Image (cartoon, rainbow, N blue to C red):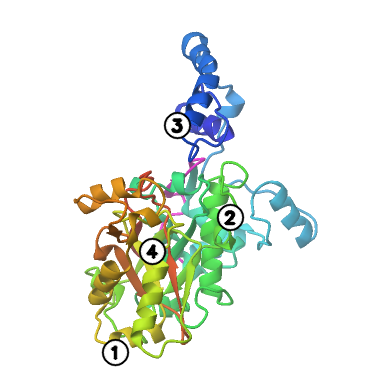
């Protein structure tokens, strides 16, 4: 209810009418849905025939000016300051650096963008995110000024309506953001691409990830239990996963070159999904077992991005597995093609209605016995070489659903400009 009312205020300045239907509505069968619809119908009829819209009161519509940000004086300990931030919904429950005006001004030195520029009206609250506010949250997250271009570019990659960040951040699915950086800026600011790159302990990766999540959750207003409805959630909801591609140890063409850029171009690629699935194989001495591990991992039934879905998914392949696959004669394109041909299960092994959906995306009749790939074509596997030595890689299933169509596009790349 809170989400409906807030969205109506943000977009129209009026309270819209609505009827609450008891959860769940999905996966309960036609008879159960009919019963709920019949129970709700009197309220729906009443709303349709007798309800009159009313303008929201001025206090509810009152919005603070986006720039300059309001400042205030605080006297107390750092612990007391952090508690105040938590109590006011200005942080995510872990400590922040006090964003004093002096620190924010210093952070703004990391970008040529004007502090009053509005980068994004962040869903679901449609909070006006100025460059000054980006800098404020970057200070809170422990960033350095030189991280600002990457933070802004990650956020700009999420703006496209097809990415549907409003849906990503208010669903029951535990969406976290994955951001992969390519180009010289990764080394310039010290982004990790090797061992443990996605796991913390590196200031650039971790603080940039924390800043992005603070911005989406605080400025965007998305926190559980409402409007963020994530059933369980995971740590990726608190700190965005930020890594650089490990170009030095990759046997393949970089993602930049694959997408028409050069390795001198600074880009960031953004995706919403997870939690990632660890792909491990400690017993195979040939490439065959490793390939089977990848095929089984990308085709598991309990993911949204299954059943020949017509959208992208991401693999973070560590250098050891990448070299093994490359040495066996597979280019990146051939590895994708092998996955698409071999990561197949009968439609009956996927959730209900897979056969009908796969018939549409594959352009052929699919029965319950037809072997169905997880994505509709091989190019939907987006591959980055990330990480260090060892026998582990990651598969990132996405938010887009083979039946529900909640995202028209899942992977977005943005050029990083200072």
Q: Which of marks 2 and 3 is nearer the N terminus?
A: 3
Which SS class for mark 2?
loop
Which SS class for mark 4?
loop
C-beta proximity under 8 Å, tags 4 and 2: no
Query: Measured along the vertical axis of the image, is residue 70 above or below residue 268?
Result: above
Q: Mark 2 points at which residue?
A: 233
Given this view, does label 4 or label 2 mark the residue nearer the observer? 4
Q: In this view, does 252 lie to the left or right of 150?
A: left
Q: Can residue 35 be seen in this view?
A: yes
Q: Name the residue under label 1.
A: 327
Between the residue at mark 2 and the residue at mark 3, the CA separation in whole angstroms equals 29 Å
Residue sitting at x 46%, y 57%: 302
Between the residue at mark 1 and the residue at mark 2, the CA separation in whole angstroms equals 39 Å
Write down the region rendered in magenta. Answer: 110-126
Given this view, does label 2 or label 3 mark the residue nearer the observer? 3
Q: Mark 3 points at which residue?
A: 30
Between the residue at mark 4 and the residue at mark 2, the CA separation in whole angstroms equals 22 Å
Between the residue at mark 3 and the residue at mark 4, the CA separation in whole angstroms equals 28 Å
C-beta proximity under 8 Å, tags 2 and 3: no
Q: Name the residue under label 4.
A: 299
Instruction: Determine crowd level at label 3: few under 14, some 14-19, many 20+ residues with C-alpha closer than 10 A.
Output: few
Res. 71 mark: none
Q: Where is residue 387 in the image (x, y as percent from the top left)?
A: 45, 80
Q: Earlier in the sequence, mark 1 or mark 3?
A: 3
C-beta proximity under 8 Å, tags 1 and 2: no
Which SS class for mark 3?
helix
């Amino acid at each position: 209810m809170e989400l409906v009312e807030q969205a109506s205020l943000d977009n129209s300045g009026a309270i819209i009418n609505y009827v609450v239907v008891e959860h769940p509505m999905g996966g309960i069968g036609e008879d159960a849905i009919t019963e709920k619809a019949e129970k709700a119908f009197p309220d729906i009829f009443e709303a349709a025939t007798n309800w009159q819209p009313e303008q929201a009161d001025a206090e509810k519509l009152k919005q603070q000016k986006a720039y300059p940000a309001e400042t205030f004086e605080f006297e107390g300990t750092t612990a007391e300051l952090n508690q105040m931030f938590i109590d006011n919904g200005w942080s995510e429950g872990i400590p922040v650096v006090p964003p004093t005006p002096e620190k924010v001004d210093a952070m703004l030195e990391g970008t040529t963008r004007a502090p009053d520029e509005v980068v994004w009206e962040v869903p679901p609250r449609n909070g006006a995110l100025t460059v000054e506010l980006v800098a404020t949250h970057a200070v809170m997250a422990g960033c350095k000024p030189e991280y600002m271009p990457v933070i802004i570019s990650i956020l700009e990659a999420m703006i496209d309506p097809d990415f549907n960040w409003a849906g990503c951040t208010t669903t029951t699915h535990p969406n976290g953001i994955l951001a992969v950086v390519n180009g010289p800026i990764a080394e310039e600011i010290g982004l990790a691409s090797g061992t443990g790159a996605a796991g913390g302990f590196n200031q650039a990766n971790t603080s940039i990830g924390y800043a992005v999540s603070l911005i989406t959750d605080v400025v965007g207003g998305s926190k559980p239990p409402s409007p963020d409805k994530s059933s369980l959630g995971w740590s990726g909801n608190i700190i965005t996963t930020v890594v650089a591609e490990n170009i030095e140890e990759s046997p393949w063409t970089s993602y930049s070159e694959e997408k028409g850029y050069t390795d001198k171009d600074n880009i960031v690629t953004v995706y919403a999904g997870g939690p990632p699935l660890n792909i491990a194989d400690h017993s195979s001495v040939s490439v065959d077992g490793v390939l089977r591990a990848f095929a089984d991992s990308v085709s598991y039934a309990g993911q949204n991005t299954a059943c020949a879905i017509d959208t992208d998914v991401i693999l973070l392949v560590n250098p050891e597995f990448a070299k093994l696959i490359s040495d066996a004669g597979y280019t990146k394109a051939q590895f994708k093609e092998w996955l698409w041909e071999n990561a197949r299960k009968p439609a009956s092994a996927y959730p209900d209605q897979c056969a009908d959906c796969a018939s549409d995306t594959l352009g052929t009749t699919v029965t319950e016995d037809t072997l169905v790939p997880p994505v509709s074509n091989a190019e939907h596997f987006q591959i980055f070489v990330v990480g260090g030595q060892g026998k582990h890689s990651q598969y990132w299933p996405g938010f887009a659903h083979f039946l529900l169509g909640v995202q028209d596009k899942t992977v977005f790349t943005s050029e990083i400009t200072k």
